[in-house]
Image: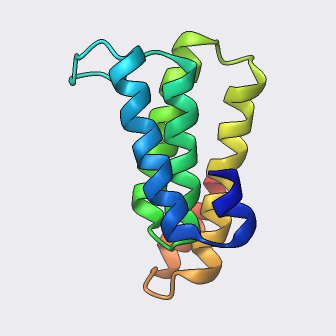
Amino acid sequence: VQESYRSGSYSKGLKVAKQYLTICEKHFGSGNKKEPDQHPAIASAHNDVGLFCKLLGDFDEARRQYKLSLVVYGNFLGKDHASYASLLHNLGNLNRTQVHLDTELKATDRMTLMEEA
């Protein structure tokens, strides 16, 4: 994942991150698909998928992945943990990036995203 990020191979990185997420879910997951699996490795994998989705311009999927990661970190590690804070930072950066790059956003949506950032 890191090599793909450093080299700018974002499509490849997304593929690898999704494979890593699948492996983590199989190894650490509960099999309950109604709620996200509760393990930091799974949260980290969701974060990686979110990062590559953001870099490829899929802002909605990036936000979904970041929020899944946020729930897991919040439940497993607590909201005072550095990993939780890092995810909040990632969500804020996603909002700022989307405001600047997504030309289809309405002005009111831009304001909402900036307020959330």
Outermost bottom residue? 103
Q: Residue at x 72, y 45 (%)?
A: 89
Residue 54 image point, x, y percent: 55, 64
Q: Quadrant of residue 104?
A: bottom left
Residue 37 image point, x, y percent: 38, 20
Residue 46 image point, x, y percent: 49, 40
Q: Is residue 105 above or below residue 64?
A: below
Q: Is residue 75 above or below residue 92?
A: above
| 114, 97: nearer the viewer | 97
Q: Residue at x 54, y 60 (%)?
A: 13
Quadrant (top left/top right/bottom left/bottom right) for the C terminus = bottom right
Q: Residue at x 48, y 59 (%)?
A: 14
80 left or right of 115 in image: right
| 79, 34: nearer the viewer | 34
Whether residue 69 appears in this view of the structure is yes
79 left or right of 109 in image: right
Residue 95 image point, x, y percent: 61, 61
| 80, 54: nearer the viewer | 54
Q: Is residue 18 above or below residue 108?
A: above
